[in-house]
Structure formats: structure tokens, C-alpha cells
Image (cartoon, rainbow, N blue to C red):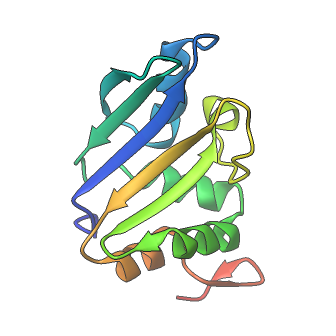
Amino acid sequence: MMEMFEEVQVEAYVFPTEDIEKVKKAMLNLVPGLKFEAFDRGDYMLLVGKTTDKRALQRLYELFRGQQILDTARMMLEEGYFGEEIIIKVHKQVAYVGKVNFNEESPLGPITIIIRTKEPKRLMKWLAPRTKNGVPIE
């Protein structure tokens, strides 16, 4: 069931006012098991985490259901779907407290989650199925 993706990559800018460990925690709250690299871009660091762990999306799966945001999640996944990549952006500070918010309008920039998959439709159906009255119908 979890063989639906090759890799999950998570990115965020880390500005001088931010604590890189807190940004890592925010990213790990959404996608556990990331291996991090940081790239100095002058005004900010680009923090990139990657994982091929087959359980990497389990946390998002649970958050979408726990927060009752399946419909919004499905819409965001469909909007961010390009070929063999699904790209979603979420609010960095909200991720730090262990929740998902697709409002990325934040002065510190969003967390970007890139899911590389050869089965995007199947993955979207699993991660955020269509619902009726909030109940999955797929």
C-alpha cells in the first residue's frame, strides 16, 4: 500500500531570525525520517530534507483526517500535481505545532513538500480521498 512513491522531499527557507532546529522540527512534524542538507543562499539558508521511507506520508495521512481537512487537502494535491510530482505548500509556524495549514501566506515562507511518484492518482486517492459530508467515498 505504501509503495506509491519513490521519494518525499521537504524544503524551507531558514532566515537569520529563525532557529534552524525549529524549522527542522516543523518539517519533521509533517514528514518524519528526513535526512537534511542546508545550502547557504546568502540572505537565507535553503533547508532540504529527503526520505524514501515508505511510512513517510503516514503523518500527513493522519493529520488530514484528524483535522478534518480531506477536501481541502485533495484540492491542494490536485492543484500541485505535475506529471510524476505532487507539490504542496504549508504554513511553517503551524507545522511547528504539529498541524497542517495550507495558508502559505507567511512572512517566513512556506514549507514545500514534493512527493515523487509514478502513481499520483492512486497516491492522492489514498492520502486524501474524495468525501461526501466529510466521509471518504473512494
Tell me what residue is drawn at x 61 percent, y 48 percent. 90
Q: Indicate the position of residue 50 as horizontal and vertical percent values.
A: 29, 40
Viewer-proximal residue, 94 or 37? 37
Q: Indicate the position of residue 95 as horizontal and vertical percent values.
A: 62, 37
Tell me what residue is drawn at x 78 percent, y 83 percent. 133
Give the answer, above or below, for where 106 lies relative to 132. Answer: above
Residue 6 placement: quadrant: bottom left
Viewer-proximal residue, 51 or 42? 42
The answer to whether 26 appears left or right of 120 in the picture is right
Tell me what residue is drawn at x 53 percent, y 57 percent. 88
Q: For the N terminus, which image quadrant? A: bottom left
The answer to whether 137 appears left or right of 37 in the picture is right
Tell me what residue is drawn at x 42 percent, y 65 percent. 86
The answer to whether 120 appears left or right of 69 in the picture is left
For residue 55, say whether it is visible. no
For residue 52, say whether it is visible. yes
Give the answer, above or below, for where 111 lies relative to 124. Answer: above
Q: How many marks?
A: 0
Q: Residue furthest right?
A: 133
Viewer-proximal residue, 3 or 121? 121
Residue 67 placement: quadrant: bottom right
Q: Indicate the position of residue 98 as horizontal and vertical percent values.
A: 62, 36
